[in-house]
Image (cartoon, coloured by chain):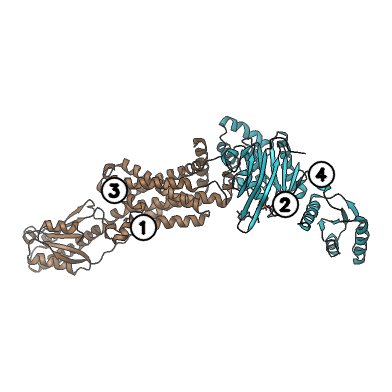
Amino acid sequence: MRWGRIRAIAIKETIQIRRDTRSLIIALFMPFMQMILLGYGVNLDIKHLPVCVYDREGSQNSQALLKHFQASEYFSIIAVLKDYREAKAALDSDRCRIVIAIPHDFSQKLSDSGGSTVQVLADASDDNTANIAIGYAQSVVGEFAGNLAVAAQGFGGSPARLTQGVDLEERVWYNEDLDSRNYIIPGVVALIMALVGALLTSLTISREWERGTMELLISTPVQPSEVMLGKLLPYFAIGMLDAVFCLVFSVFWFHVPFRGSLFALFFTTSLFLVVVLGVGFLISAAIKSQVGASQIAVLVTLLPTSLLSGYAFPIDQMPPLVQWVTTLVFARYYVTILKALFLKGSVLEDLIRPVLAMGIYAMVVAFLAGRAFKKRLD
Amino acid sequence: MTPEPGPMVEAKKLVKNFPGVFAVKELSFSVGKGEIFGLAGPDGAGKTTVIRLLAGVMPPDSGTATIDGIDVVRDPEKAKQHLSYMPQRFGLYEDLTVDENVRFYADIFELPVALRNQRIGPLLTSFGMEPFRKRLAGQLSGGMKQKLGLVCALIHTPKILLLDEPTTGVDPVSRRDFWKILYGLREEGVTILISTAYLEEAERCTRLALFHQGVMAYCDTPAHLKTKMPGKLLNIASPRAREIQKRIQSLEGLSGALLMGDHVHVAVDDDLKRIPEITRALAEAGLPFDPVTVTEPTMEDLFLALLKTKGASP
Ligand SMILES: Nc1ncnc2c1ncn2[C@@H]1O[C@H](COP(=O)(O)OP(=O)(O)O)[C@@H](O)[C@H]1O
Ligand SMILES: [Mg+2]
């Protein structure tokens, strides 16, 4: 392998990307569009979510609040629990997404200081459903507090004191902002990177076959691996640029907290790019028309990434067979990593398993891509 | 002319089949150093396939070929260091400038930068392309494109040039320029293998192979080939040459009438017998024409006549 030839191909490819409107749109405009569309456009409405309740007071007030929950179209109370241990077990076993716990002094606090607290327990690190559920719980409690205030007024109490109403003490683990967008955005980043990377590279070899430039190129002593590396280098740079853009956009525009290590982010992003670009290159080498290659690229990235990566639809709620299938979806690992980096503040050591999975994927894809392109006509 | 010892290009029993088509059938030939070896024949004769096999971009079904003694079939990558191939379809990057294309191919062949810069300028100047260095290749004329292809092919000083119909679709003036360049290269000892659809152009080759349906029907110097022309060739000049051609083709035993502008060429077995016969037939039809004369065959006449005799004797 000769660096001079790799560099020549990288330079040539860069010039071509710069002069190709379609590539520029995919590289620069698409990430922006997708961020906006998916960042604002996700709608994850939930109806009749199973909840468990733990009523420590058992008063008229607490029962009234629980009736409110039951009446709301968002929730169905499926079990009444007797202690925190049961609550934890219910969450861990996925029997319910959240547990509503009413403190033993609920009514007293409500009448004494005008503000009481309801606890909502959820694990929201990899389940946006819980996040959204907590948002709904907040609105149910808000309504309940409003009713109280009206009722209290009827008894001549002071409305000013009662508007504080019931407070919801959020104990969402890891994503306490309760923003479903926080949950979605890291996945959107993965989706964009997969789509842009695979789409751009899917054109690179097929374009040369289509335009007839490949026949001349393969008549030179250039090696297939040099062609592959030279062609992928510029796309790797573009992918990294897009990653930076997505990160900056997520943090400064959508205000998604980023708590993890930047090093881990760029290390795992590089790994993910290797997989994505390798897949794009494989497609490009196998399908000699640009239209065909780009269609396949969209199909193999967009579909599995949006449906099976867990970016919006939690994997642990899928049927077992589908869950098994998701282990083959490379974006799944990156989504897991990104969510952990953004929301949990993980460092590289916490992510050994998904990183390892991506590493294996990257090696397999690189190996296949290296052999896919043949310097042969027919 | 016989090839010198140690041929630069040698094909031995090359075979290439496509589904339903025998593109190249047991082809053997050799080309000596400094030759301009021509491949002529109609579309679909197999010229492109032969050149692709020699360039190492397509493996043959069987047989071998060597480029400067290197086995192309077994070690195509090594052979590729000594040859340059210009595909029939323009193979350079139309969205790159002239300079960018040349530099790209110089780098692919690992020319040191100093040598590269030293070669690019004079090459472009001698091809009259200096003013177009910053122009996109896609915006060049047909002739210019082919010259650029040649510049890129020559940048690494190959020993062997494989040119597939480099002058097709190129205007006559540029075509003449192109051939001047080829002769210059030949002087420098470059071996050239060129296919062409223009038979008058084929006459400029040192040796010529006539292809027909994947078979090399004839291979010799143009002068020798002409002596193989059976019978004689008659020339009839007329302002209504097309009608003359039609009339002659309807005559018994005279199907091979070739229209060449305001002339018609007719290959005949016996000129003494045929001249009066034709003169009478044309006069009866009331067509104007100059007296019928015997003439030197062109490549086109030759090709037509040779293939007909080949077809007649299976
Ligand atoms: N890649 C291919 N696949 C199938 N058939 C081919 C291919 N290339 C050439 N052929 C067929 O082989 C024959 C010879 O073609 P070619 O070598 O292109 O002839 P020429 O260059 O003399 O026009 C033709 O019948 C053509 O249709
Ligand atoms: Mg051809």
Number of numbered discs on residues: 4
Q: Colour of chain B?
A: cyan
Residue B258, image x, y percentages: 81, 57
**From where the camera sits, is residue B94 visible?**
no
| Mark 4 or mark 1, whichever is nearer to me | 4
Asked whether, in this view, residue A122 is left or right of residue A342, the answer is left
Compute the Cα span from label 1 to label 3: 19 Å
Q: What number is the disc on residue B245?
A: none
Name the residue carrying label 3.
A342
Q: Is residue B39 above or below residue A138?
A: above
Between residue A31 and residue B145, name the one nearer to us. Answer: B145
Q: What number is the disc on residue B41?
A: 2
Q: What number is the disc on residue A306?
A: 1
Q: Is mark 2 within 8 Å of ligand 1?
A: yes
Q: Amino acid at mark 3?
A: Phe
Residue B254, image x, y percentages: 85, 61
Q: Amino acid at mark 1?
A: Ser
Residue B20, image x, y percentages: 62, 59
Asked whether, in this view, residue A7 is left or right of residue B194, the answer is left
Q: Secondary structure at mark 4?
A: helix
Q: Secondary structure at mark 2?
A: loop
| Mark 1 or mark 3, whichever is nearer to me | 1
Between residue B99 and residue A50, name the one nearer to us. Answer: A50
Compute the Cα span from label 2 to label 4: 17 Å
Residue A183, image quadrant: bottom left
Asked whether, in this view, residue A176 is left or right of residue A210, the answer is left
Q: Secondary structure at mark 1?
A: helix
Name the residue carrying label 4.
B223
Q: Is residue A326 above or below residue A156?
A: above
Residue B205, image quadrant: top right
Image mark 4: chain: B
